[in-house]
Image: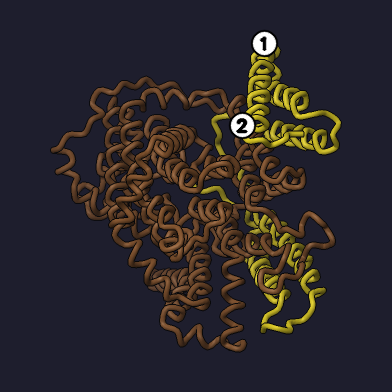
C-alpha cells in the first residue's frame, strides 16, 4: 500500500511554492515592458508564477479536510532502523568539505581523503576496525580521481 | 538505409564498440543495485562525455540506458527489490519463480524478454524515425509549443500520485530555467544581481543534484539494509525455441505496448511494464496464476520495459521531445555537445541520429550477451558494501560538477538541488516532470514567442493549424480527463449507495 502523504507537508510545500512564485513574480515585474514582440521577457515568469500559485492553492484546499483525519504513517513496517541523523551528518560534512575547498583552506587531495574517510567512518557505525580499510580506499579514490581529472582531462582541481 | 549502413560501419569500430560495451555493462551493474538507476548513472557520466567525440558519447549513454533498464530485473527476480522502477512488475512473478528454485529460469526468461522487446522496438525505431522526422520538419513554432505543452501535461496526468503535484513540479522545473539571458531579447532576467546567475543555471548541477545527490542522502537513511544472500547457477537459463514459440504472441504484444507507451511523451518504462503486465493478465486463460511465479508475467513486464526505451527514442531523435526522464537527460547531453535535438538532426548530423538507432540495436545484443554469460557474477555486485559505493558516488558528483566549468557556484547549486530533490521525494512531488519542465522550458518559450511574433500576438494558430490544434486538444483533454473520470466514479458510487439504501 502506498504511504499516505501528510497533509501538513502538502500545506508547507504549497506555501514554499507560493513564496518562490512571489519572488519570481516580483523579479519579473522589474523587467521592462515588451517593445519588439508581444510577450516580452517578463510574461513567461509571471505566467508560471500565477500557475504555480493557483496549483498551490488547490493543493492547500485539498489538504485541509485531511488535517483532522490523517493518522500518520507510524504503523509503517521497515526491515531496518532508518538513520535520518546519519544522512543529515553526511550532508553537513559535505557542506564543510565544499566550503573548505571553496575558501581554499585545504587543497583537494588532503581535504578529499579526510572527507571520504570521515563519512566512511560514520556510515560504518564508527567501527574503528574498518577505518584503515576506508582510509586506504579513500586515498585510492581521491588520488586516482585527481590524476584522472588533472592529467587525462587537463582540469585543475582545487 | 544508406545512412543506417554507414552508421553500422562507424559504430562497429573498436572505440565505439568498447564505449558501448562499457556503457551497457555499467548500466547493467548500476541498474541491478537497488536504489541506483540508469538516470543517476547517465547524469553522473555526462561530465566525462565533454571530452569525447559526440557520436562516441551518445553511443555510450545509449548503452547505459539499455543496460540500466535491463539490469533492474536481477534484483527484482532474486531479492524482490526492483533494481530500477521499471522492474517493479518483474518482482510479482520473477521473485516467486526464483523462490520455487527456478531463479535461473526466471532470469533467463527476463533477459530473453528484454532482448526481444529491444529488437522489436528497434524495428519500430528504425522504420518510423526517418518519416516522422520528415513530417516534423513541416512543424512551425505553434506545433512545437503545443507538442511541448502536450508532453508536460500528459506526463503530469499519467504520473503516479497527485496530478496537481506533478504539474507543480513541471512549473517549478520551468521556473528554474528562467534566470539568465532572455533567449529572445538577450536581456538579463531574474538574476537578482548575482553575477553567477547571468549564465543561467547549468543543466548538470541541477540534474546531478536532483537525481544523484538526493538519492544518495535517501539511501544513507537505509544504509543498514542488506540484501539476503542468494545462490545462483546458470543451469536452465537458456530459453528453448519451443518457449519462444509458446510465448510468441506475448512477446509481440508486450513489445508493441512498450514501444507505444515509450512513444508517448514523458512516460517511462515503469508505466509500460505495468500496462503490459495488466494486459497479459486480462487476456490470459489463467489470470489467477499471475503473481505466483507465472512465466508470462515476467515476459510481459520485461519485454515492455525494454521496448519502451526504443519507443522513447523515437520522439527524441525526430522531434527533440523526451519520451522519458532519461531521454530528457539525453536531450541535455545533445545540447551540451552543441547538437540540436529534433528533425534537423537527420539532415545536419545524420551520424548522431542514425548512431542512436544503431547503438540501440548493438547495445541490446551486447546486453543479451553480457547478461546471459555473466549474470551470476553481476548478481554478486548486489552485495557491494553501501558505504563504499555511496561515498564514491558522492565524491564523484562533487568533482564531476566542479570540473564542467571550474567553479564552486555549480557545486553549491548541485547541493541545493540535492536538498530540493530530497524534499520533493519526501512530499511525493515527482522528479520526472521537474526535469522535463527544466529541459523543455527554453524550447517552449522560444517557440511560443516566435509564434506570437509571426501571428502579431494572436493565439488563433493554436486552433487553425491542424497539428497544433490536435496537440492542444490532447493537452486539454489530458488535463481534464483524470478529473472527469474521478467525478464520474464518485457519481456512480453515490448512485450505487443510494440504490443499495433503497
Q: How many marks?
A: 2
* Residue B111, picture quadrant: top left
Residue at position x 56%, y 56% in the image: B338
Q: Is residue A97 above or below residue B331?
A: above
The residue drawn where x is 62% and y is 87% is B457
Observer-nearest of B62 and A61 = B62
- Please determine whether, in this image, residue A38 is positioned above or below residue B48: below
Can you tell which mark lies on residue A129?
1
> What residue did someone put label 2 on?
A152
Residue B254 visible? The answer is yes
State the image quarter where residue B192 is shown: bottom right
What residue sits 35% from the left and 31% below the top? B370
Residue at the spot 15% in from the left edge and 37% down from the top edge: B241
- In the picture, the quarter occupied by the C terminus of chain B is bottom left
Q: Is residue B313 left or right of residue A28?
A: left
Q: Farthest residue toward the top?
A: A129
Please tell me how crowded label 2 is: few (under 14), some (14-19), or many (20+) other residues with Cα within 10 Å. Answer: few
Give SS at disc 2: helix
Q: Earlier in the sequence, mark 2 or mark 1?
A: 1
Position of residue B432 measured from the top left corner of the image (x, y, whole percent): 54, 55
Name the colour assigned to chain B in the rendering.
brown
The residues tagged by marks 2 and 1 sit, at their Cα atoms, a distance apart of 35 Å
For residue B109, above or below residue B375: below
Report x, y in % for residue B165.
Answer: 60, 61
Task: Say which mark, if any, is on residue B297.
Answer: none
The subunit letter for the residue under badge 1 reads A
Name the tint of chain A in the rendering: yellow
Other residues around mark 1 within 10 Å, as few (<14) / some (14–19) / many (≥20): few
Nearer the observer: mark 2 or 1; the answer is 2
Q: What kind of colouring is applied to the model shown?
A: by chain
Amino acid at each position: 500500500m502506498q504511504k499516505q502523504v501528510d497533509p501538513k507537508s502538502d500545506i508547507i510545500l504549497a506555501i514554499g511554492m507560493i513564496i518562490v512564485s512571489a519572488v519570481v513574480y516580483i523579479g519579473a515585474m522589474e523587467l521592462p515592458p515588451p517593445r519588439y514582440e508581444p510577450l516580452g521577457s517578463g510574461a513567461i515568469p509571471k505566467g508560471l508564477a500565477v500557475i504555480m500559485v493557483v496549483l498551490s492553492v488547490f493543493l492547500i484546499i485539498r489538504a485541509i479536510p485531511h488535517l483532522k483525519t490523517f493518522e500518520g504513517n507510524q504503523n509503517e513496517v521497515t526491515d531496518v532502523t532508518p538513520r535520518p541523523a546519519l544522512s543529515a551528518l553526511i550532508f553537513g560534512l559535505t557542506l564543510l568539505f565544499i566550503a573548505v575547498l571553496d575558501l581554499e583552506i585545504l587543497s583537494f587531495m588532503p581535504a578529499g581523503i579526510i572527507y571520504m574517510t570521515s563519512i566512511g567512518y560514520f556510515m560504518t557505525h564508527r567501527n574503528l576496525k574498518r577505518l584503515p580499510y576506508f582510509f586506504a580506499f579513500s586515498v585510492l579514490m581521491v588520488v586516482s580521481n585527481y590524476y584522472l581529472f588533472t592529467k587525462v582531462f587537463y582540469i585543475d582541481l582545487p | 538505409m544508406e545512412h543506417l549502413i554507414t552508421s553500422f560501419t562507424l559504430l562497429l569500430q573498436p572505440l565505439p564498440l568498447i564505449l558501448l560495451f562499457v556503457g551497457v555493462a555499467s548500466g547493467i551493474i548500476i541498474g541491478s543495485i537497488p536504489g541506483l538507476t540508469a538516470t543517476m548513472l547517465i547524469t553522473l557520466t555526462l561530465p566525462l562525455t565533454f571530452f569525447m567525440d559526440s557520436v562516441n558519447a551518445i553511443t555510450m549513454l545509449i548503452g547505459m540506458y539499455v543496460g540500466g533498464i535491463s539490469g533492474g530485473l536481477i534484483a527484482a527476480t532474486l531479492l524482490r527489490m526492483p533494481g530500477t522502477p521499471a522492474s517493479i512488475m518483474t518482482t510479482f512473478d520473477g521473485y516467486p519463480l526464483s523462490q520455487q528454485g527456478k531463479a535461473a529460469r526466471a532470469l533467463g526468461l527476463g533477459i530473453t524478454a528484454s532482448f526481444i522487446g529491444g529488437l522489436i522496438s528497434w524495428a519500430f525505431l528504425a522504420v518510423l524515425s526517418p518519416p516522422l522526422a520528415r513530417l516534423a520538419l513541416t512543424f512551425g513554432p505553434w506545433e512545437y509549443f503545443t507538442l511541448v505543452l502536450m508532453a508536460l501535461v500528459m506526463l503530469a496526468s499519467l504520473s503516479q500520485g497527485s496530478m496537481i503535484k506533478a504539474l507543480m513540479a513541471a512549473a517549478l522545473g520551468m521556473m528554474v530555467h528562467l534566470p539568465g539571458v532572455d533567449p529572445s531579447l538577450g536581456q538579463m532576467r531574474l538574476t537578482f544581481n548575482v553575477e553567477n546567475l547571468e549564465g543561467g543555471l547549468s543543466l548538470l548541477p541541477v540534474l546531478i543534484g536532483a537525481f544523484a545527490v538526493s538519492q544518495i542522502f535517501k539511501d544513507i537513511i537505509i544504509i543498514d539494509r542488506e540484501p539476503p544472500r542468494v545462490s545462483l547457477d546458470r543451469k536452465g537459463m537458456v530459453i528453448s525455441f519451443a518457449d519462444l514459440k509458446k510465448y510468441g504472441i506475448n512477446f509481440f504484444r508486450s513489445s508493441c505496448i512498450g514501444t507505444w507507451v515509450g512513444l508517448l511523451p514523458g512516460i517511462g518504462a515503469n508505466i509500460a511494464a505495468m500496462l503490459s503486465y495488466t494486459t497479459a493478465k486480462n487476456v490470459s486463460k489463467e489470470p489467477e496464476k499471475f503473481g505466483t511465479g507465472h512465466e508470462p508475467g515476467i515476459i510481459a513486464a520485461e519485454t515492455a520495459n525494454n521496448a519502451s526505451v526504443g519507443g522513447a527514442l523515437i520522439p527524441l531523435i525526430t522531434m527533440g521531445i523526451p519520451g522519458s526522464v532519461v531521454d530528457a537527460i539525453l536531450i541535455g547531453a545533445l545540447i551540451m555537445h552543441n547538437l540540436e535535438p529534433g528533425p534537423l538532426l537527420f539532415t545536419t548530423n545524420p551520424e548522431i541520429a542514425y548512431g542512436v538507432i544503431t547503438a540501440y540495436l548493438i547495445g541490446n545484443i551486447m546486453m543479451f550477451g553480457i547478461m546471459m554469460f555473466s549474470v551470476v557474477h553481476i548478481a554478486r555486485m548486489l552485495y557491494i558494501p553501501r558505504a563504499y559505493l555511496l561515498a564514491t558516488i558522492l565524491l564523484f558528483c562533487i568533482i564531476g560538477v566542479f570540473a564542467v566549468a571550474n567553479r564552486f557556484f555549480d557545486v553549491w547549486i548541485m547541493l541545493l538541488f540535492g536538498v530540493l530533490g530530497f524534499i520533493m521525494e519526501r512530499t511525493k512531488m515527482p522528479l520526472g516532470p521537474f526535469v522535463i519542465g527544466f529541459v523543455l522550458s527554453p524550447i517552449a518559450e522560444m517557440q511560443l514567442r516566435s509564434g506570437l511574433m509571426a501571428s502579431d500576438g494572436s493565439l488563433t494558430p493554436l486552433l487553425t493549424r491542424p497539428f497544433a490544434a490536435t496537440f492542444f486538444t490532447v493537452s486539454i483533454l489530458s488535463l481534464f480527463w483524470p478529473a472527469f473520470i474521478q467525478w464520474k466514479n464518485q457519481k456512480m458510487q453515490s448512485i450505487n449507495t443510494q440504490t443499495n439504501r433503497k
